[in-house]
Image (cartoon, rainbow, N blue to C red):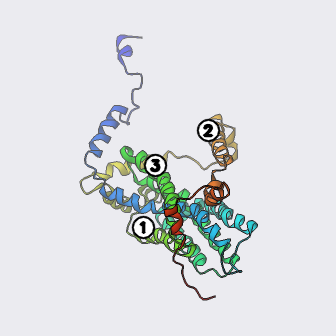
Amino acid sequence: MDIQDERRPLLEAESGHPSPTGLIAEQDAYLSKVKNGKLYLATFAAVLGPLSFGFVLGYSSPAIPELMNDANARLRLNEDQASWFGSIVTVGAAVGGLLGGWMVEKIGRKLSLMLCALPFVFGFTIIIAAQNVFMLYVGRVLTGLASGVTSLVVPLYISETAHERVRGLLGSCVQLMVVLGIMGVYLAGMFMDWRWLAICCSVPPTLLMVSMYFMPETPRYLLFHGKRQEAEDALRYLRGPDAPVEWECARIEDACGEQGSSFRLSDLKDPGIYKPLMVGVMLMAFQQMTGINAIMFYAQNIFEQAHFQVPRALASSSHRPSVPLAS
């Protein structure tokens, strides 16, 4: 080995490809011209979905005690029915997760988000107009279906529209909005009866459907389907008029080309696949085994059965307005 070989960088770029240092410099130059205002707007529109998801998760907690004491015998829940009212949302969510995976590939991320708002709105509308327990169940299943789609599509939409500097920050907004939705419906439940609460819960998904109409499809989805001009237009909207979006388009196209073939069951023999998959599945399983969903669904019942003392100021809010409906 001569002196020239010893001085050659260990990570020397292959011919025709820029070095890692060069890529970082190009990326910094590109991001210096990016404006994030429209990106934040698109993210806000998308996270109305997780906010609605949080409303769905928390809705049963304040609603069940009222429904168990409802004056209408056809709506009054017994203990078994109350249990189903809280938990049946997970059935819809399981179906929604599978449906969402198909939708994002067939009709795109944007349209999937717009369409998932419909079962949110229809589900809460059925709950508002419910005349029997079966209608309550149907409403919960529909809102669960929308929640399952939302939990898959929104993180994907944000990750494909955000650039490297803010992707982690904006991605964390998904779980933040879910938690805010749960807390919001708990607080609203102290001052509203279950019908008015359902009306309030239908507002965010309505705004989601309207606002997403004005947002772009993700550039990655457009480029994957050969729509380069539309992808550049989407990037100009998200990055601002001064950003040289052709550079980012080229990077996304390269990434799409490196995706490789579709998944096969034989791929699970690869330790690089099955080990992280097992870790992820076990983490999710242990999280569910903590019983957190049961606490979210039945929080008010749990505190009441624990003889938790409610402050008088809050107890006075039990005289809530109700929605008059013809029986």
Q: Residues within 10 Å of mark 2 (few under 14, many from 20)?
A: few
Return the mark for residue 172: 3
Q: CA distance from mark 1 to mark 2?
A: 34 Å
**Camera-nearest residue between 212 and 273:** 212
Q: Position of residue 168 (x, y in %)?
A: 43, 45
Label 1 vs 3, first from the N-terminus = 3
Label 3 vs 2, first from the N-terminus = 3
Q: CA distance from mark 3 to mark 2?
A: 21 Å
Question: Tag 2: residue type?
Answer: Pro
Q: Residues within 10 Å of mark 3 (few under 14, many from 20)?
A: few
Q: Is residue 245 above or below residue 317?
A: above
Is label 1 or label 3 in front?
A: 3
Q: Residue at x 67, y 73 (%)?
A: 69
> On the image, numbered disc 1 is attached to which residue?
212
Q: Is residue 136 visible?
A: yes
Residue reaching furthest to the right: 80
Q: Is residue 227 left or right of residue 90?
A: left
> On the image, numbered disc 2 is attached to which residue?
276
